[in-house]
Image (spheres, rainbow, N blue to C red):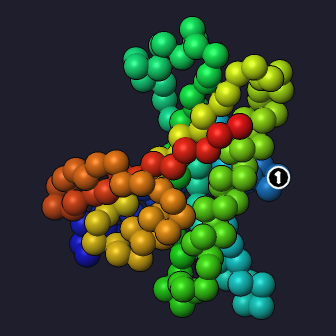
Amino acid sequence: YPAIRKMVKSALKMDLRANTTKVGNNTAVRNRFKDKGGDFWVAKDIGKSSIIGCVGVSQRKKRETDQIESMASSKVVEYEIQRLAVDDKSRGKGMGRKLLSVAEEYIRDQEARSNPGTKNASITIKLWAVTPECLIAANKLYESAEYKKEETFQAGTLCMNVYCKSLYL
């Protein structure tokens, strides 16, 4: 799919243009996600020392409809799953599910640490993911991980699916 290749190239260009120097364990890509209130992980094949998958997560920007939340006893925070990819040879072995689990666990931990005194308030975490409809395995992964398809839109020649999953603290 040429349109997907173009999308991946654009995403990599955006991820790498920030800061190309390595600081400790942080890379330019990881720093970009950390700057957006998230993080980035890679999965390695230990025997071959090769990367077999990756996923990033970042906080979504507040929208105007979120103004009501400050008056309520509940809080809604939103994150976006990005750059989820698994090497062709490693698919079907649970790696995509594991990467999603790592991202979800990180988000839960972050929100629990950020909101220690929320005894009488509930926190809803909405996780969003957007993926091309033609990537059947990716769509099946999100659906099997209890993400619900919220909408479909056209991005150039690609039909994109938007998924959402809610977590509660």
Give x and y (percent) for residue 99: 64, 66
In the picture provided, is 93 more to the left or to the right than 23?
left
- Do we see residue 25 in this rendering? yes
Image vertical order of residue 70 relative to residue 15, above or below? above
Q: Quadrant of residue 95?
A: bottom right
For image coordinates 72% across by 44% down, the residue present is 108
For image coordinates 44% across by 65% down, the residue present is 143
Residue that sits furthest to the left in the current view: 157
Give x and y (percent) for residue 128: 47, 47
Image vertical order of residue 60 relative to residue 96, above or below? above
SS at circle 1: loop
Label 1 Cα crowd, 10 Å radius (few <14 / some 14-19 / many 20+):
few
Disc 1 designates what residue? 24
Residue that sits furthest to the top in the current view: 71
Quarter containing the C terminus = top right
Give x and y (percent) for residue 51: 64, 77
Q: What number of labels is visible?
A: 1
Q: Quadrant of residue 40?
A: bottom right
Residue type highlighted by circle 1: Gly
Give x and y (percent) for residue 101: 66, 61
**In this view of the protein, which residue sits in the foreground, 9 or 118?**
118
- Do we see residue 28 in this rendering? no
Quarter containing the N terminus = bottom left
For image coordinates 72% across by 90% down, the residue present is 48
Image vertical order of residue 63 relative to residue 15, above or below? above
Image vertical order of residue 135 relative to residue 35, above or below? below
**In this view of the protein, which residue sits in the foreground, 32 or 88?**
88
**In this view of the protein, which residue sits in the foreground, 63 or 8?**
63
For image coordinates 34% across by 73% down, the residue present is 135
